[in-house]
Image (cartoon, rainbow, N blue to C red):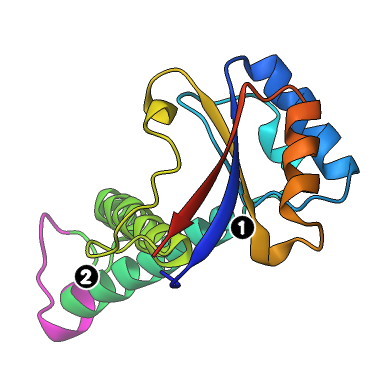
């Protein structure tokens, strides 16, 4: 966490007002750092201009790695390293490998997505979270505007937030 981060925080009660406010704030050239909500709000990612997540591509690549690893492991064990004839079947019978291949594909996909999500989101066990308002886990929506990323001054950002329907506008400083 960077020392001395200044934020202007707008507090909203209604998600419909919040969605209109996001469009209003962005149209006034104010860069929103993040929006916090106690529940998912449909369409908020499009309103904020977020791009589609590439996590599905990562999941596919980890799944492909799991499939390749499972088939290679089984073909090596049953066909090369320690071949055994079980019930008169081939050493490397693909249909018998399907359950283990499926399980390893799902396992590596899930673990890879979790690890990638934590890495990309910068979620570390020792990182202290920024709490903009304690009511964001209960009933309020919060729009956080980073002062360092905006060309407008504090009073202009506050007036834009108030003009967009914010119930409260506060300044929050993180050390």
- The picture places residue 135, in percent across and down from the top left corner, at 40, 26
Tell me how many marks there are.
Answer: 2
Q: Residue at x 20, y 84 (%)?
A: 80
Q: Quadrant of residue 86?
A: bottom left
Distance between the alpha carbons at the discs numbered 1 and 2: 39 Å
- The picture places residue 108, in percent across and down from the top left corner, at 33, 60
- Camera-side residue of 115 and 68: 115
- Classify residue 47 as left or right of residue 45: right
- Camera-side residue of 101 and 94: 101
**Numbered disc 2: secondary structure:** loop
Q: Farthest residue toward the bottom?
A: 81
Q: Is residue 2 above or below residue 32?
A: below
- Classify residue 5 as left or right of residue 14: left
Tell me which segment is drawn in magenta: 78-88
- The picture places residue 116, in percent across and down from the top left corner, at 42, 64
**Residue behind mark 1:** 54
Crowding at mark 1 (Cα within 10 Å: few <14, some 14-19, many 20+): few
């Amino acid at each position: 966490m960077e020392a001395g981060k200044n934020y202007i925080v707008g507090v909203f009660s209604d998600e419909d007002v919040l969605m209109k406010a996001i469009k209003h704030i962005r149209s006034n050239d104010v860069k929103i750092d993040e929006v916090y909500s106690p529940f998912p709000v449909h369409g908020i990612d499009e309103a904020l201009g977020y791009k589609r997540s590439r996590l599905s591509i990562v999941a596919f690549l980890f799944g492909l790695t799991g499939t390749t690893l499972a088939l290679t492991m089984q073909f090596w064990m049953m066909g090369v390293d320690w071949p055994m004839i079980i019930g008169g079947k081939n050493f490397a019978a693909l249909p018998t490998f399907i359950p283990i291949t499926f399980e390893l594909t799902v396992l590596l996909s899930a673990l890879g997505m979790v690890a990638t999500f934590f890495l990309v989101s910068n979620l570390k066990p020792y990182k202290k979270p920024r709490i903009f308002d304690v009511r964001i886990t209960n009933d309020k929506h919060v729009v956080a505007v980073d002062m360092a990323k905006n060309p407008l001054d504090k009073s202009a950002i506050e007036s834009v937030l108030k003009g967009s329907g914010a119930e409260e506008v506060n300044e929050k400083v993180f050390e």
